[in-house]
Amino acid sequence: MKSIRNHLSLVIALLSILFSMQIFIIVDRSIDAYKENLANNYAVVIVSQKRLSDEVVLGINKLIASSGELTADSVIERLNSGMDKKNIEFLKLTLPKFYKLKLDHYPTPQEVITLKKDLLKNSSITKIEDFSHNHDTTYKLLLLFKGVVSVFALSIFVVTTLLIFKELRIWQFKHSERMSIMGLFGAPVWLRSAVLFRLSIVDAFIASIFAFGLFSYIATNAWILKQFESIDISVVIFNPIDDFVLLLGVAISLSILLASFIVLGHKEEV
Amino acid sequence: MDKVIMAQNLTLAYSNNETIINQINFSVDSGSFVFITGASGSGKSTLLKSIFGALKPKQGSLIVGGVELKGVSSSKLNFLRRHIGIVFQDYKLVKEWSIEKNIMLPLIINGYDKSVTQNQVETLLKHVRLKHQAGKYPLELSGGEQQRVAMARALAHNPILILADEPTGNLDDYSSQLIWNLLEGANSQLKTTVIVVTHHIPESLGVEYKHFHIEYGSIHEVN
Ligand SMILES: Nc1ncnc2c1ncn2[C@@H]1O[C@H](COP(=O)(O)OP(=O)(O)OP(=O)(O)O)[C@@H](O)[C@H]1O
Ligand SMILES: [Mg+2]
């Protein structure tokens, strides 16, 4: 019973660090996926006096991924009532050309400004519609969201680390007697601290396995998957190999670091 | 004759700089049996601490088992300690380990294999009359029983030198005799050098011994 309690404090601390880390990873992935989604739906429309070939348009700025002409027919059809054929043909010739540009990735506001400048250098382009107001707001919201989550994850990390350090004192006290006695019988440092390292590595494994269970559950939970579906993005919530290895690595490094602190802080009493 | 311990102008002090042992000269022959007596607070335990390297000489030189302890490296000190068996005045048993495991400690540190360790521990438990308590933990034993565990641990790895700080301090006559027999046996059969701090030198000891007395920071042999 007592030994379970000994494990629990470090396991819980490690678990909360792993939890905040994985949540941060999920948010980061969601934002990336959402940005990609936005880039697909995002387009710049330009108005030109002359026909522009694909090469010309693509040469203007690297950000432009493709260009497509919007036909004027649909516009004209709506005006069609009571106009004769000749006039329509004339109208077609005089109407400017419309192009819809798809972008390579979701642009930052700065990239949008540069893009506009580059486009206007072409003298035949007269107007650019970039939906920049909407774009700005969405982009800033995403950054804000990411910022908030980062601060949240970081503060969990800091608070837990402080808790662990407090726990460290207790550990140091608990283990120092045995380590001193072993030292008095000539045990080298690695042997004196073997128990400590074994304990902390076992705790790291326990915490990682708990985290694995928790995130495997979250990754298959219907309600959570529906939330992601509703904003139309697909995200890997928990990769059972890569993410687990990362979590395990962090947990083991942290607990080894902790045990090393105890060993280094240990002084032989006289 | 070989000397296990050689002290020259040895001065010992704790960090508060109060001198406990002042410029003493003495030596202990290999294979001998030595008693150290002295009033409470005279520095008997302090002298033992210096012999197993927990308190470094402040001045002078102290050579134990051929190792100069002034400025000794920790690996050399560990090596030396693996050949010493100590009975501490306050026992220093590991509370979270069973009696059995406590006695095993020096054997584990010296890398003995499992079967040797198991046999040795069983023999020792029999010798100190604690076979039925093997699975218990130190705090579940009486003071005298803990002291006997400490004795068994000190003997476990057949050390070349045994340092025993009042090993019968908490024992009745019967158990005290048990301890003296064990120390006598180690000394006569295994040629182990034995140094015992005590207030009462037993009247009937089957081996020859020397007797040192500590007083006012000095040591002298009593004849
Ligand atoms: N860790 C320490 N730090 C400072 N002074 C100490 C320390 N240990 C012992 N002393 C002091 O050193 C002196 C000798 O102590 P020591 O333990 O060697 O006495 P002793 O002869 O073993 O006495 P006893 O018969 O009561 O065990 C005492 O005055 C004690 O106060
Ligand atoms: Mg003493």
Image (cartoon, coloured by chain):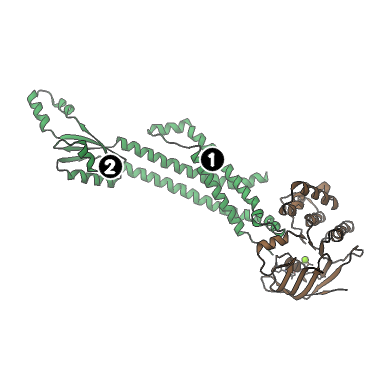
Write down the colour of chain B: brown
Left or right placement of residue A202 versus residue A46 in this view? right
**Which of the two discs, 1 and 2, labels the residue nearer the N terminus?**
2
Front-most of residues A262 and A227: A262
A6 up-or-down from B215: above or below: above
Instruction: Mark yes or no: residue A32 visible.
Output: yes
Q: For the C terminus of chain A, which image quadrant?
A: bottom right
Residue at 13% across, 26% down: A79
* Residue position marked by numbered label 1 in the rendering: A211
Residue at 81% across, 63% down: B193
Position of residue A72 measured from the top left corner of the image (x, y, whole percent): 17, 29
Position of residue B222 measured from the top left corner of the image (x, y, whole percent): 86, 73
Front: mark 1 or 2:
2
Residue at 65% across, 50% down: A195
Amino acid marked by disc 2:
Leu
Front-most of residues B218 and A19: B218
Mark seen at residue A63: 2
Front-most of residues A128 and B65: B65
Front-most of residues B105 and A11: B105
| Element assignment for label 2 | loop
Give the Cα separation between the discs numbered 1 and 2.
40 Å
Left or right placement of residue A53 versus residue B168 in this view? left
Answer few, some or many: residues within 10 Å of disc 1's Cα (few below 14, many 20 plus, some between 14 and 19).
many
Q: Residue furthest right?
A: B204
Write down the colour of chain A: green
